[in-house]
Amino acid sequence: NGTLLDDLAIQIVDAADSLGSETLAYVGQAARALAINDEVAAVSAFRSLQDALIQQDTTNARQRVQDDLRKRLPGLSPSMQRFRSILALLGDAQNGQTDPSKFVPIVRKLAQEPRIRNTANVVAARLGERVLSRGLR
């Protein structure tokens, strides 16, 4: 006998849980990808940094660093890609920045609804349980 709000709460908890665990795994993979394990990698990293610093055109230098990082870093997981898409939808299309203050009136209005408050409490409790259980493992 689940309502739409209950189903949404379950999906939010599942998505946040998988995003959290996938993000931690990604950080580990990224750290390994950026680790310098040999002299060849050290020289390559130094030359990339040197080329970026020497460039007078900061836009081109930034693009080269971004391209180099894209080559070295692992791809984003599906959950991370969905989260990035959501942030892009919520953000400003012109400069990629999100102004959180524009959501305050919406959150205030939703917070006045008792069912929304109860569901938010359930989501927070379930996320807390998952974080705690992962911490105990």
Image (tube, helix red, strand yellow):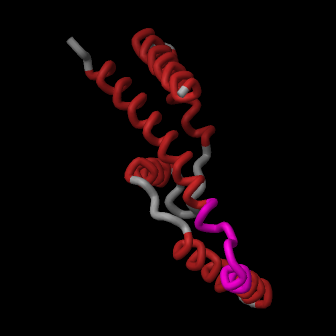
Q: Quadrant of the N terminus?
A: top left
Residue 34, percent from left and from top = 64, 68
Q: Magenta residues, as a range?
A: 31-45
Magenta span includes 43: yes
Residue nearest the viewer, comparing 137 with 8: 137
Which residue is at 38% across, 52% downward?
A: 78
Residue 49 x/y as whole percent? 74, 81
Foreground residue, 90 or 128? Answer: 128
Q: Is residue 24 left or right of residue 84?
A: right
Image quadrant in which you'd find residue 33: bottom right
Task: Indicate yes or no whether the magenta region holds residue 19.
Answer: no
Q: Residue at point 73% right, 85% down?
A: 43
Q: Quadrant of residue 40?
A: bottom right
Residue 35: percent from left, percent from top: 67, 67
Q: From this view, report whether residue 8 is shown above or below residue 3.
A: below
Query: Residue reaching furthest front?
Result: 38
Judged left or right of residue 101, residue 125 is: left
- Residue at image coords 45%, 51%: 80
